[in-house]
Amino acid sequence: MNYIVGDIGNSLIKISILNNKYEIKQIYNFETRKVFSKSIKEKFLKKIIKKKLYKKALFSSVVPKAYLEIKRYLSQNKFKVYEIKDLKIRKILKINVKNYNQLGSDRISNALGSVNYKNCIIIDFGTATTFDIIKNGFYEGGVISPGVRLSMMSLNQSTALLPILNLKNKQNTVGKNTQEALNAGFLWGYEGLINNIIKRISSKNRKNFKIILTGGYAKLFKKYIYKKSFIDQNITIKGIAAVLEKLL
């Protein structure tokens, strides 16, 4: 038996087929804004549901309208669809936050995907850049900062002359033209932001945290992080798979 799970983010939807051991077998990605189009349903969703699948599907979502659209489509095809916060997550993850309802499903999934690490910081380079903290096996909250791509687009839209930046992974000097100046600002700026947040979290908690990176800019910024880190682009899906296995 195969299973269907998915992560619905602000920019991207990732749908995965799991095998009977709850391991990732296939992954399909498409832009979130395109979920309402007929072509996406024909190209991706229709193709996926033709497979021999367990009739319960589980999603992590931070975009309610996109989730409802996928839920409607799958329900029409006799699937029972759940969002992870519909389930009793606290049974499998110890959560120490002030308001659970405000905690994003993607961040819960990331925490569950890091289950092999008792003390870690998960940095997710998504629409927002998030830092989630697992300490002594507890989810302890985290930090949310503007995403790299979102910041670049915002600067472009708010200025008359500054162009959209194609961020490059090398910057040896201050900018000698507008593109180089922007590249220096974003590359060095986020380098400082990331390392400062890691340093503060580690110092405050007096822990030597494992650093896990995921999301679009993980590979680019990995070499700028002072502490040893590694990339896991499927950590969110792994977390959702853990919920499916244990609670559905």
Image (cartoon, helix red, strand yellow):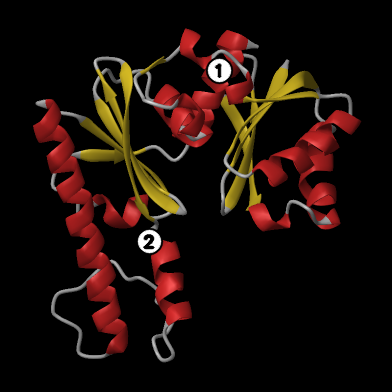
Residue 141: x and y in percent read 33, 30
Q: Residue at x 34, y 20 (%)?
A: 96
Report if residue 164 is visible in the image: no
Residue 13: x and y in percent read 62, 46
| Residue 210: image tag | none
Amino acid at pointer 2: Val
Amino acid at pointer 1: Val
Residue 102 as seen in the image, left or right of residue 33? left
Q: Is residue 37 above or below residue 137?
A: below
Q: Is residue 124 above or below residue 185?
A: above
> In the current view of this chain or complex, which residue is farthest to the front?
98
Q: Residue at x 32, y 57 (%)?
A: 220
Residue 56 as seen in the image, left or right of residue 105? right
Q: Residue at x 81, y 56 (%)?
A: 37
Of 31 and 86, the residue lying toward us:
86
Disc 1/disc 2 C-alpha distance (Å): 29 Å
Residue under pointer 1? 243
Location of the C terminus by quadrant is top right
Residue under pointer 2? 148
Of 136 and 2, the residue lying toward us:
136
Residue 85: x and y in percent read 58, 24
Location of the N terminus by quadrant is top right
Report if residue 248 is visible in the image: yes
Residue 143: x and y in percent read 31, 41
**Image quadrant assignment for residue 235:** top left
Secondary structure beneath dot 2 equals: helix
Secondary structure beneath dot 1 equals: helix
Q: Earlier in the sequence, mark 1 or mark 2?
A: 2
Q: Is residue 2 above or below residue 68?
A: above
